[in-house]
Amino acid sequence: MPLISEFPALPGLYQLLFLHIEPISTVMPAIMAWSFPGAAWFHHELIPDGTPAPTALSDPRTTMAIWQLGNCYLLLGLISTFVFRAVRDALPDNPVAQERILGASFTALALADVTHILWSFLGLPDALKYDLASWNSMTHGNITFVVFLLSMRLAWFMGIGRTRYYYGQPAAAAGLPAKKTA
């Protein structure tokens, strides 16, 4: 199967980003937190400070929280990977249904993007918040890349660069029953 296959509700760049790049970008932090470079490194990199990461975390609760965070990253990647492919494969001739399911997923992901960006930014020390040059790859991943993903989700909802089959369409055009009037 080619990298970019027919998926009317998720064409071109959207398909590349949400079916391939985003799942990889969420599964990788899980692996990094669990194995290499490990929970201590992952925890240390959340707020850049230029010091070397410790070799281990002293508090087992913190280690557990980082491992559980890795599980959340894995879950996001697996949902994008398996659910989006299932939508594509199970509904190949129904772009309206594809778009409705993707839209529900993108709504949940967009809300999570907003809170992820907000909490990541608010958690930074004041001296780092607006000093983007001091941010490390973890900070840029948690804020800059998630802003990009949110922007692309919003562009998808607005129909930029794609045909809309459900969102932004009249009910009849989207294959919905007409609303009854009293």
Image: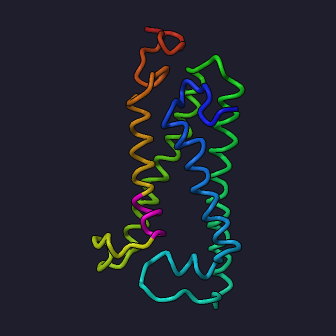
Residue 141 on the magenta span: yes
Q: Where is residue 148 in the image (x, y as percent from the top left)?
A: 41, 50
- Residue occupying image coordinates x 42% and y 33%: 157
Q: Please determine whether, in this image, residue 21 is positioned above or below residue 30.
A: above
Most common SS among magenta residues: helix
Kindly give the residue lying farthest to the front in the view shown.
Answer: 2
Asked where in the image residue 152 lies, by quadrant, the reply is top left
Q: Where is residue 93 in the image (x, y as percent from the top left)?
A: 64, 17
Q: Is residue 154 left or right of residue 90?
A: left
Residue 77 on the magenta span: no
Q: Nearer the viewer, residue 30 or 169?
A: 30
- Residue occupying image coordinates x 59% and y 31%: 101
Q: Position of residue 86 (x, y in %)?
A: 70, 33
Asked where in the image residue 154 lies, by quadrant, the reply is top left
Number of marks present in the image shown:
0
Q: Please determine whether, in this image, residue 168 is positioned above or below residue 84.
A: above
Range shown magenta: 137-144
